[in-house]
Amino acid sequence: MSESWFDQIDRTPVSYAVLITYVTMAFLTDPMQPTLDQLVDHGAAVGILVADGEPWRLLSHAFLHGGLLHLALNSYCLLNIGPPIERYMGWWRFSLLYVVGALCGALSAMTVNHEHVPLVGGSGALFGILGAAVAYNIRGGRTLLDFLENHTARWLISMILLNLAVGLFIPVVSNSAHVGGLCGGFVLVFCFLDTGRRTRVDAVGRVIQAGWVALLLALLWYQMQPVLRFDFNYKQYLAATDPQRKQVLRRYLIGYERLAPDEEWIEEHPPKTDIPGVRLRQWIYEQPSFSRKIRDTFNGWKH
């Protein structure tokens, strides 16, 4: 006999409470395409505002989304991975996991992003759930071969790699938040939370565990190099080559009156022109055949 919706909600209340919050916040802003003003007013994580006495944004951003597609994808992911992990962990551990994933994702993204760039979305926290699932599998005492032969484990790894790959090609996707949340969830379960399983891990298992930790830390280090980010390079190119640099900075990095830097800040942050990605972007924009098309594409995006 299949479990009813009411039974599922009763057994996994936090997952469905998060989903309801997603939808509620979407309608409080705009479910189709919220403006930057709406997102910032309702809790988007912006480095300069967090540093100015609004640390709650490190968590509130994880319940906001940048449009209907963003909301739908994260809601679908939450419904697929949230309830099984919550049933296994219990509601309070799962709540802690979501908070830690959101915090680590926000801190990671703000380390990489410009201090005026807003961050929204629950994907950092969702990656934390994925990281926790990986940690549970490893702490269960499985060898590497057993882990990869398990269907659930293969699905987890595929989900992680697929989402990271998407983030490499879509500038508005924050892979730094994804990796930060992934590492936060993994470390929380692997190092601090009791899994309820006391399987003895031999020397080979410990080497495998250390390898997973090293891999996640390597991914985090790699993602912390902003010169590899397509959107970062584009903004640096604008700052270095556009004759109206001050207006460009305001248009692409601000867009909201509370975030506007003063003239002194602009003068103290000169453009960087010695980054390989900037030089490559400059060469692309100097090609007359498609430079206008690229400019028009970027002009249509909302950051």
Image: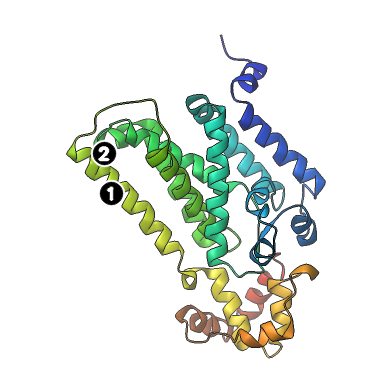
Of all residues, the one furthest to the top in this rendering is 1
Q: Judge by depth and name the residue closer to the eye, 15 or 71.
A: 15
What residue sits 49% from the left and 81% below the top? 280
Label 2 neighbour load within 10 Å: few <14, some 14-19, many 20+? some
Looking at the picture, which amino acid does disc 2 mark? Answer: Leu
Is residue 30 found left or right of 145 in the rendered image?
right
Query: At which x and y percent is residue 12?
Result: 59, 25
Q: Which residue is mark 2?
A: 144
Q: Judge by depth and name the residue closer to the eye, 107 or 283.
A: 107
What residue sits 68% from the left and 91% below the top? 243
Looking at the picture, which amino acid does disc 1 mark? Answer: Gly
Query: At which x and y percent is residue 70?
Result: 65, 49
Q: Judge by depth and name the residue closer to the eye, 290 or 302.
A: 302
Query: At which x and y percent is residue 117?
Result: 65, 66
Q: Taking 166 as reference, is 82 above or below it? A: above
Q: Quadrant of residue 95?
A: top right
Of mark 1 and mark 2, the one earlier in the sequence is 2
